[in-house]
């Protein structure tokens, strides 16, 4: 039986990646709708949507991929439920903070550095990619954020190259990702147009379309766009921008839905193209 690759969308930036022998949980946030989430510097937001699947009902992950340590990406419910010895791949800054909270298996990756895991003839590689959470000097006040390149190989053959953007803003220098990493099979893009004090802190529809056109993945799956009150740019903004620019391979994914990630499997799961 040929190994397969898929993603299940749980909510916000939380997804479950099944890559053959490996299971990866991204940005775990499992608090219910109505709960308050602390964003730092006295700022709070409220969750509007329930996660589609609670953590105890998910398959046990081999590791957590955490783009940054913010309350809507690693919340109080996740901190209580995720085992303290589960490997967490994240930024160097988040590693230090997580280990102080006794998540001893947290591992920080500087930009462009990678970690690998091998099992049953398969290889999983995660490479930290550049990202900026805020404009100008504001970025220094926010948690460090990373994008991630998730590569999966079977018997020495690359099967999937997935880009998880993290909460980065669009910047032209992100073209280095494609230059250094090659063609991208699929992209999980964090959107939402998050605003605090009028400042844009995550990509809105226009910036999301800018990045999609820059990276040109075969499949683009938008996530992180309507779970919290601070998100001001709905999914429809991004889809409209992509239609205007004739960007292909853009596919909404519903909460609780599973979509195939292999190029030959794009479109499975019932979601419609933009």
Image (cartoon, grey):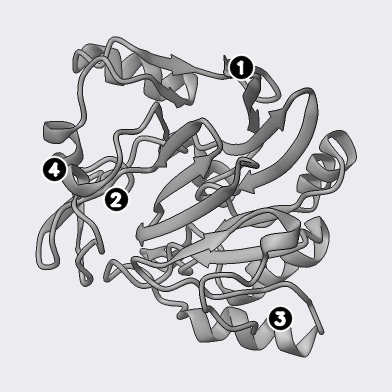
Residue 100: x and y in percent read 23, 13
Q: Are marks 3 and 4 in contact (CB under 8 Å)?
A: no
The first of marks 3 and 2 along the sequence is 2
Residue on which the image places disc 3: 242
Q: Is residue 106 visible in the rendered structure shown here?
A: yes
SS category of the residue bearing label 2? loop
**Could you tell me how far apart the alpha carbons at marks 4 and 2 are, in whole angstroms?**
11 Å
The first of marks 3 and 1 along the sequence is 1
The first of marks 2 and 1 along the sequence is 2
**Could you tell me how far apart the alpha carbons at marks 3 and 4 are, in whole angstroms?**
35 Å
**Could you tell me how far apart the alpha carbons at marks 3 and 2 are, in whole angstroms?**
26 Å
Q: Nearer the viewer, residue 8 or 250?
A: 8
**Could you tell me how far apart the alpha carbons at marks 4 and 1 are, in whole angstroms?**
28 Å
The first of marks 4 and 2 along the sequence is 2
Q: Is residue 35 left or right of residue 196?
A: left
Residue on which the image places disc 2: 72
Residue 260: x and y in percent read 58, 59
Q: Are marks 3 and 1 in contact (CB under 8 Å)?
A: no
Q: Is residue 211 visible in the rendered structure shown here?
A: no
Q: Is residue 1 left or right of residue 77?
A: right
Q: Specify the quadrant that holds the C terminus.
A: bottom right
């Amino acid at each position: 039986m040929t190994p397969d690759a898929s993603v299940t969308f749980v909510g916000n930036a939380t997804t479950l990646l099944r890559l053959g022998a490996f299971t990866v949980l991204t940005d775990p946030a499992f608090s219910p709708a109505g709960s308050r989430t602390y964003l730092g510097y006295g700022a709070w937001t409220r969750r509007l949507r329930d996660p589609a699947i609670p953590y105890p009902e998910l398959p046990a992950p081999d590791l957590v991929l955490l783009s940054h340590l913010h309350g809507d990406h690693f919340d109080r419910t996740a901190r209580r439920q995720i085992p303290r010895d589960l490997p967490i791949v994240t930024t160097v800054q988040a590693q230090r903070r997580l280990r102080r909270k006794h998540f001893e298996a947290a591992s920080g990756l500087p930009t462009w550095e990678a970690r690998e895991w091998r099992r049953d003839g398969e290889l999983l590689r995660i490479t930290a990619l550049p990202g900026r959470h805020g404009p100008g000097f504001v970025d220094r006040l926010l948690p460090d954020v990373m994008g991630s390149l998730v590569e999966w190989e079977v018997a020495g053959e690359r099967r999937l190259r997935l880009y998880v953007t993290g909460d980065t803003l669009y910047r032209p220098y992100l073209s280095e990702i494609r230059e250094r990493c090659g063609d991208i099979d699929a992209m999980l893009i964090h959107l939402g147009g998050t605003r605090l004090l009028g400042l844009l802190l995550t990509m809105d529809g226009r910036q999301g379309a800018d990045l999609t056109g820059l990276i040109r993945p075969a499949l683009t799956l938008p996530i992180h766009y309507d779970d919290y009150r601070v998100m001001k740019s709905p999914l429809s903004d991004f889809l409209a921008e992509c239609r205007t620019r004739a960007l292909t391979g853009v596919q909404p994914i519903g909460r609780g839905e599973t979509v195939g990630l292999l190029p030959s499997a794009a479109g499975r799961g019932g979601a419609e193209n933009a």
